[in-house]
Image (cartoon, rainbow, N blue to C red):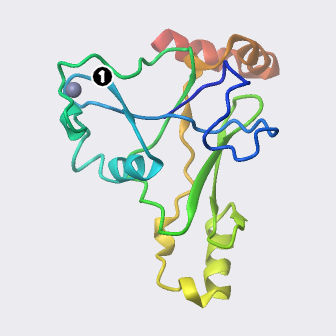
């Protein structure tokens, strides 16, 4: 998954109110298990489907209609946008609910939450359990399908000015260690 951070004027698909600068996902991508190229995935739903089955059926280029490993990559992994990498196996979001991710201002972390069909924002599985209990209409929704694991923010794609803020707050050594590994 990637989010474009360098062009604040661009309306973001995931932000309904353009006046609110919410840093959320604007592009979904999956990496081919064979050629390692990144392919853009058109919708969040399709992306979630791929992510939920990543371990049993790794993504390959030809899952996209008319695309093969010979085609150039749709998108390159680099610092022109900030990338966040999801843990594989996160279940597909139950119908009617929406999973949302927002990047903290200091780029330290993404926070995962769910929006219920009634527009409520829930941040923990306990809140979700309470919601389902209070709304018997959703009693068939499986609580284990809600996963609040946030994706890893890739430090090598954090904009320079944000990175400085991160290191001045004491994470400088950690940053360096990650860079050295890469
Ligand atoms: Zn491929």
* In the image: residue 37, left or right of residue 84: left
- State which quadrant residue 61 falls in: top left
Q: Position of residue 87 (x, y in %)?
A: 44, 44
Looking at the image, the residue that sits furthest to the bottom is 136
- State which quadrant residue 118 falls in: bottom right
Q: Position of residue 143 (x, y in %)?
A: 51, 73
State ligand 1's quadrant. Answer: top left
Q: Nearer the viewer, residue 119 or 16?
A: 16
- State which quadrant residue 106 falls in: top right
Which quarter of the image is occupied by the C terminus? top left
Element under label 1? loop
Q: Considering only vertical position in the picture, is 59 above or below 31?
A: below
Tag count: 1
Residue at 30% over, 52% down: 53
Q: Position of residue 102 (x, y in %)?
A: 67, 43
Q: Nearer the viewer, residue 137 or 132?
A: 137
Q: Nearer the viewer, residue 122 or 75?
A: 75
Rate crowding at label 1 as few (under 14), some (14 to 19) or many (20 or more) other CA atoms within 10 Å. Answer: many
User: Which residue matches tag 1?
Assistant: 37
Q: Considering only vertical position in the picture, is 21 above or below 177?
A: below
Q: Considering only vertical position in the picture, is 164 above or below 61?
A: above
Callout 1: CB less than 8 Å from ligand 1:
yes
Q: Position of residue 73 (x, y in %)?
A: 32, 19
Residue at 55% over, 25% down: 154
């Amino acid at each position: 998954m990637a989010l474009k951070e360098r062009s604040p004027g661009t309306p973001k698909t995931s932000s309904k109110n353009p006046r609110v600068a919410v840093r959320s996902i604007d592009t979904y991508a999956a990496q081919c298990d064979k050629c390692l190229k990144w392919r853009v995935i058109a919708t969040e739903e399709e992306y979630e489907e791929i992510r939920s089955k990543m371990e049993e059926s790794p993504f390959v280029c030809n899952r996209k209609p008319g695309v093969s490993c010979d085609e150039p990559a749709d998108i390159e992994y680099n610092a022109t946008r900030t990338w966040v990498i999801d843990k594989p196996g996160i279940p597909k979001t139950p119908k009617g609910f929406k999973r949302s991710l927002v990047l903290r201002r200091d780029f330290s972390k993404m926070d995962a939450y769910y929006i219920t069909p009634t527009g409520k924002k829930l941040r923990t599985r306990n809140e979700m359990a309470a919601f389902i209990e209070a709304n018997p209409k959703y009693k068939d929704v499986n609580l284990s399908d809600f996963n609040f694991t946030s994706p890893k923010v890739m430090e090598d794609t954090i904009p320079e000015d944000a990175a400085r803020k991160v290191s001045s707050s004491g994470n400088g050594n950690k940053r360096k260690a990650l860079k050295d590994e890469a």
